[in-house]
Structure formats: C-alpha cells, structure tokens
Image (tube, coloured by chain):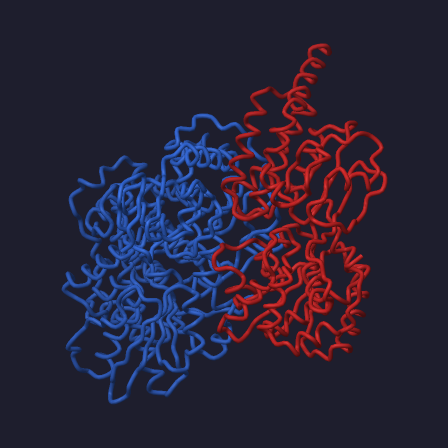
Amino acid sequence: MQIKKQTKGKAYKKAKKLGSKEVIKLLKNKAVVGQGGANFPTGTKWEMVLNEKEPEKYIICNADEGEPGTFKDKFILTNNPDIVIEGLLIGAEVIKAKKAFIYLRGEYEYLLPKIKRSITKVKKQTKSKIPIEIVVGQGAYICGEETAIMESIANRRPQPLQKPPFPTQNGLYGKPTVLNNVGTLANVSLAIHYKDFDPELRLYSLSGNLTTPGIFELKLGIKLGDLIRLGNPEHPIKAVYFGCFGGCMPYNPDMKISPKDICGKDCILGSCTIIAVDEKHSIVDMATNIAKFYEFESCGKCTPCREGTMRILGLLENISMKDASMKDLDTLQELAEVIKETSFCGLGQTATSHLLTALKHFRKEFEERVKEKRNRRRVAR
Amino acid sequence: MTKVKVDNKEFEFDPNKNLLINLKENGFNIPHLCYQEGLHPEARCRLCVVEIDKKLITSCSHYPKEGMEIKTKTKKVKRARKVNAELLMPEHMDKCFRENKHHDLCNIISDLGLKKVRFNPKKKYKVDLGAAVIRDDNLCINCGRCVQVCSDIQATYAIDFAGRAHHEHVTPYYEKDLPEMYCTKCGQCIAACPVGAISEREHLKEVLKVLKDKNKHVIVQTAPSIRASLGEEFGMPPGTLVTGKMVAALRKCGFDKVFDTNLGADMTIMEEASEFLERAKKGGPFPMITTCCPAWIKFMEHFHHELIKGKNMSSCKSPHEMLGNLIKNYYAPNNKIKKKDIIVVSIMPCTAKKFESTRPELASDVNYVLTNREAALLIKHFNIDFVNLPDENFDPALGISTGAGAVFGATGGVMEAALRTAYELGTGKQLTKIEFDQIRGMESIKEGSMIVNGIEIKFAVANGLSNAEKLLKIKDRYHFIEIMACPGGCINGGGQPLPYSKNKVQARMNAIYEEDARLPLRKSHENPVVQKIYKDCLGKPLSKKAHKCLHTHYYKRKL
C-alpha cells in the first residue's frame, strides 16, 4: 500500500530546500487533492494562504473524522502517523505558519500517545521548531466543518460561520488558515518524497452488510462490483450508500467509482465511503437510522436543520412504528428538499440527500411500509 | 450604486448595505426574524431567502453585486419560507395562539397565508422568573438576537446558547436562573426579541389594586424620556412630545398626584455637581462616574467593583429614587399624609429600575415601577382616548422641572445638565452657551472639555455597556464620566415601545432636546422647587440630611 510507505523526514528536508513556491508547484504538478471529499487542489489552497499579507498564519490537520462509515483517517493515524505529521510540518513551513494544530476526533483519544510519540520522532528527524498542538474534540459531528473546527479550537461554541470570508483569508483567530485532511497531508509527504507517487489512489472505507469490511487502497474509477466483491457479501446487495451525506443508489456492479460518474446521479462520493445494504434489510430502517444520526448531530444554528431533522425523524418513525399516510411521504419529500436548499452549512445541505435519493430510487419500500402498517392496524381493530 | 434586477425590474442598490435592507427600502416585503439593524447577520432563521441563479441564499448575509438577478416570488422561495416558518411555529405557537398575540413570527405566518401548522408543539420548558426580566423558553425560536445584544452590545454575556440540535436553547450558564446571574436587567434583550419570549416582570395588577384602594394616596412620577415615546404606543409618530396628554391620561387613571421625575433629575444634578466641585477642590479622586443608570450600577458591581474601592462612583441615587424619597420625607409631612399611605409608582423606560426598587439599601421609596409599555397598557385598560386628550400640567408641589432634567433621557444628558450647574456654581458666572454639542448625538463614545476656574475639565460619555467597557480602559484621562447602559440612553431603554429601530431612537432624542429648548428654566439650580426643598428641608447640597435622603452605597457582587 502506498499509504504505508515511510518518508523518514526526507520529504520535509526536500521541501525546505525547494522553497514554498516550488513545493506548491510540485503539488500542483502531482495533482495532490483534498481527501476530505471536496477534491480541492492542495497546492492552490496553500498558495492562497501564502499570498495573504497577514504575518500570522495557522495550519490545522482535520482528524475529526465523524462521518458514519468512514475510517480511513483512523487507519492512517494507526498505521503511519509519521507521514501525516511530516506533511503538517511541510505545510506549516510552506505557508510560514506560526503554529500547527491537530484536531483529533474525541472518540480517537486512544491514539493520542501514538501521535505524541510520532510528533517527537518526526520533529527530531526534521529539526522543525514549529509548535504542534493536539486539540481533542468533544464529539460533535459539526466540528468536521471547516469554520466550526476553528471555532472549536478557539474555545467557542462550534457552529459554522458565514462564508465568505473563507478560512484561507479569515480563519482561526481571524487569521489566514489552512485546513487539511489527514489523508491529504499524508499524500503531501508521499508526493514530495516519491517520484512514483500515484494521486489516483484512494482509501475506500467499505462497510455494511459485508463479511470482510475494511480499508482498501484502490484507484479512482474502478468498478463498484469489483470493490464490493472484496467485502464478500453474504446476500445479494441491493443498494450502496456513499456515507451518510452522499446519498444512496441502487447497486450497479458496472458503475465506475469516480466523482464524475457519481455526482451525475445526485450522489456525492465524498471521502470514498461505501456502505452496502443487502436485500435482507429495509431502506426505510436505514433512512430512520441515518435520520437519527442527523437529528442528534445537527448543531442547532439554522432553522431547517435544527427543526427539520427532528421532524424528519418523527415522520420516519411514524412510518415504521405508528400510523402514517401517503401524505406524510410528500411532507417528508418537501421537508427534505427545503432543508437541502436553505440550510446554513454543508452538513445541513447534505443531511437529507440520503432521504431524497432513497425516496427517488426506493419509494416503493416506503409506500409498502405505510400500507403494511395500515393493514395490520385494520386487522387489530 | 449597483444595478441589480429584482423580479425582472431594474433597481439601484447600495453596495454597502445588505440585500435585505436594500430590498426593504425598495418596498419589498421580505420576512425575517434573526436579523436586526446594527447586529452582525447570523443568518439563522433562513426566512429571508431569495433566489439567485436558481439557488436560495439568505438576503441578510449577502451584498448586492453588479448585474445580480434576484427573484423574490418564485415557487421555490415561497415554499422555503413557508416550510421554515412552519418549522419555527410549533415552538412558539401553542401559547401564542391561545393569547392571541401579534409577534413578528405570528405576523409572518399570517402574511404567508398559513392557517394550520403540520407539526406538533415541542415539550415544555420552565419559565425563568426574575425581579425584572422574565424569559419564557416556550415562546423562544432560537433566533439569537438576545444573545447577540447581550454579548456584542452590552458585553455582559449573561445568556448564550446551550445544547445542540433541537435541544438548543437560550440560557444563562449551567441552566441557572436569571436572578442568580450577572444579568444587568438592562432589558435590551426584550427590545431585541421578535417573539416576546423575554418580557419585563409586570406590576400592572398591583398598581391597579392600589389605585382602587381609597385609603392610599397614589403618586405617579414619569421619567424624562417617557414623554417622547409614549405616543408611539397609541399610533403617534415617533418623537411626538406628549407631556400634557400623558399627565391628563394618568390623572384619568386615578393617580392622586402626577409628578415629574425631571425634578428628581434636577436634585441629582445639584448633588452630583456639588460632589464634583468638592472633588475638584480636593483634587480627586478622579474620574467621577455618574450613577443614574441602575443597569450600569449592577454591571459595575459585578465587573468593575474596583471603582467602588477607588471611590470613583458618585454616591447619588438615581433620579426617581431621589424623588421617591422626597415624596415620602418632604411632600408627605408637608401635606399631612401618613408615610405608609403613600404609594409611589414610577413610569420608567427601564427594566433595571424594577430591580433597583427591590434593592434593600434603597429601602424602596418607590413602590412599583412600570415600564413605558405597561403604562400604555394601563391607559388602554381605562379606555382613555389618549390621542385626543387636552393637555394638562404636572402637579405643582413637586412638578416643576427644568430642561436640564429633560435631557437626562438621552445619552450625554446627565453630563450636559451637570456641567451647566457645575460651571455656574463653581465660577459664579453665567454660561454663555448652554448646549454642549460635543456630547450630543448617538456616537458610542463622546468626549469634550471645559475650563472652570482656570482648570481644564475633561469629560466623556459612553452609551451601551460594551462602549462603557472601552471607555473604562482609558478612564484616567478624564475627570467626569457618564455611562448609560442602553445604546442611545434611556430613550432606547428596555421598557420603551417595541419594536426597536434606530430612526425611532433618533426621533425621540430630537424630541428630548426640543423639550429642553422649549422650557424656560434650563439649569437645575435655577429650579425654584429645588431651591425651596434645600431651604425647607435639606439645607444645602451634600449636607448630612441630603446624604441620608439622596445618597446610597454599592456592593461588590460575585460573578
């Protein structure tokens, strides 16, 4: 696996020799892009911050991996934290940051000693003097959002802020800030050190109704069927979810996994998370489960996300537990669309895409569930 | 100016103002709840959405750009507004529909043509009862205006959001109650709330009860700023002076005497100016800080109690407490009324004065404090046709006041009045120009200087507690400081008619200065009643008796 390769401080030394502009050029040439889901070119992001006149700058490593079904950052931090730290130091060196931060997900606190050891080790290897502070999150999903993470580090209530201004101009403590994913920073070290670095390789987090779930390093654009086969499903697969926020689509083994192919079908690939659902399981239950997650994790800032997610969960529970009518499905659809259109941040805007896609592709299951419960009620009376 | 298209018509928008204000100025009706003039747009409520390039954006947080095509009436916009309003309503609806109130949200709901809300109301929260401010979370829609006012404008940070997702609610820290908090009771959150979830503690019932009681001699006193704003509650334009109508209406309500707090203000000035002159003689301690504003006093006791130790605070009571004391200790014996039969009701633009009247060291010379809104309710309760009432005058015994008392209502007024008297008492000369223009107006911090007996006196005025905080950092530069907790002074107090708007405050301020210019007496020490009170009862300013009646002390309070 490419991600397990070591760089031993050599990437940092090379970066220092090259200088900021050359490193940015190299990253652009090697097509290093953000691994968090947006696929934004890392070199461009660093260049934007480097060009800011403000002397005080910061860099943050986003290790707040809260997306259900995603565990690639955990995999990297467990198996090869050194290249992440080295990437962070390279970034700090390139943008001339005053301080670097690692925002670690609260549930990953057990990795803390390992990361601390790695920091000491890499600092010895690179002789870098940039301070690194590890901030352990308190377990809010919203802290994965780029402005909320900065609010959280600055000891404020983690809620997203209005963009623009973007964090590259006005980020942590109001200073220009770079925020990079764990995977991105790992790729930075690898891209600088190895000539045969392949930017197309992704870490797929594969889970769901599979017997051998896990992390698989494969190229973008492979066929979905090939990937699912690696997970050895017990029963035939019915649908795949691209994480919670990515939405779902019927299982099509010949479909290529790439942002282009998937985004055309109103799903988002995001950070290469794939949750497989087999025929034994209902999409309605899946939707209820995900709705529960969003109802709990909404930050509470804007009306549609705060109130809407709760109402969606209520309606879905009504469908499975109590009585519901076909009208409720329309309410569900309308609510989901408005939440998508009017929410404040990315979390809210994607909080209902799972439901919208499920209603689009599997509306029958919802309708059946409504009818089935009605029949049962009639019998009971 | 930027050219934009709205609903296929061309308009010119001001690029420095956000879309919402621009649209409203051009006659578009855009519903909005969480945005308030002068506050940073948080864009929480998502009601002010408009469509640009097939995307919905909030108009409060975006600015016009050249060639923008804005659509305000598409299906998408209408649906989004409707659903979001519907989502907010269950939180608010239950109580509000029962009591048939008309808050901003209720109006928006009816504007959108919603008759029924599809969602059930949420669970109940407890109601936070305070001596002055009451918070009812059941009405709250989490727009965050109160939180922003409390932190950004008042720098008090008494309330903030807690909980996440739909458990998010506004609360003092650790779910404490407001009375336990360092809340200053300034009431600016009441003015900010679009749904009436925060309100003053009403004392109307008690007042109605004593009004019916034949044995009680009920005296009402009205604050300087009330006369400039009470008319708004009866549909008159902001800034209409209604002094005469107000007195007539209150007499009709059954108050035995109607006195003017401006007289209390004149007394305050006599004491404060004398205190300042004495300090000037002794050479300190400077700066001396005014104490007319009870919200500022509470703020100081919590956050700046070093000022008590440093003896920077003047020891004068606030004007209405002074007048309350004079009513009980001067008016009552003179008119042979038993002290316990006298009930003093103050009509104030302020919720902090409600709290002040419960302070033990003031021994409560004022029995009840009504806000401006409550006074209007009282007048409406008696079905009085306020607008067409003939003008009447205050009762003469304690009802003669000066323009110096009137300007108390606006920020900088106390300073102006005090300087008029201090100059003339200190130098014995006539002041040629009695308007101090440098400390008039709505700016956050104003400063000026004046030469008295060859010494330059530097003074500064702050309004809004966050500005007070800024001013206190540089306080050593000045000799005399006035601080008012509410932005704009009492004319924008927490008890003034709702809703808040900057133009309204400006209109009220103009009215106050108009009243000052109109009055024949404009300096406190020229007031014959003040002179008479000193002659008959108190002796001279700062005498032992004056200290007993008109001065107080302060405590250090915990955070």
Decide if residue A70 is on the left or right side of residue B65.
Answer: right
Chain that is coloured blue in the picture? B
* Viewport quadrant of the N terminus of chain A: bottom right
Q: How many marks?
A: 0
Residue B271 spot, x, y in % from top left: 32, 73
Residue A242 spot, x, y in % from top left: 68, 41
Residue at 73% over, 12% down: A380
Q: Is residue B312 visible?
A: yes
Residue at 85% over, 39% down: A211
In front: A99, or B40? A99
Q: Is residue A173 visible?
A: no
Q: Residue furthest front?
A: A196
Q: With respect to residue B192, does B537 lie above or below?
A: below
In front: A219, or B410? A219
Residue A84 spot, x, y in % from top left: 73, 65
Decide if residue B414 is on the left or right side of residue A167.
Answer: left
Residue B204 spot, x, y in % from top left: 39, 43
Q: Colour of chain A?
A: red
In front: B536, or B353? B353
Quadrant housing residue A143: bottom right
Q: Residue furthest bottom?
A: B454
In front: B475, or B22? B22
Quadrant housing residue A30: bottom right
Residue at 21% over, 79% down: B424
Decide if residue B519 is on the left or right side of residue B226.
Answer: left
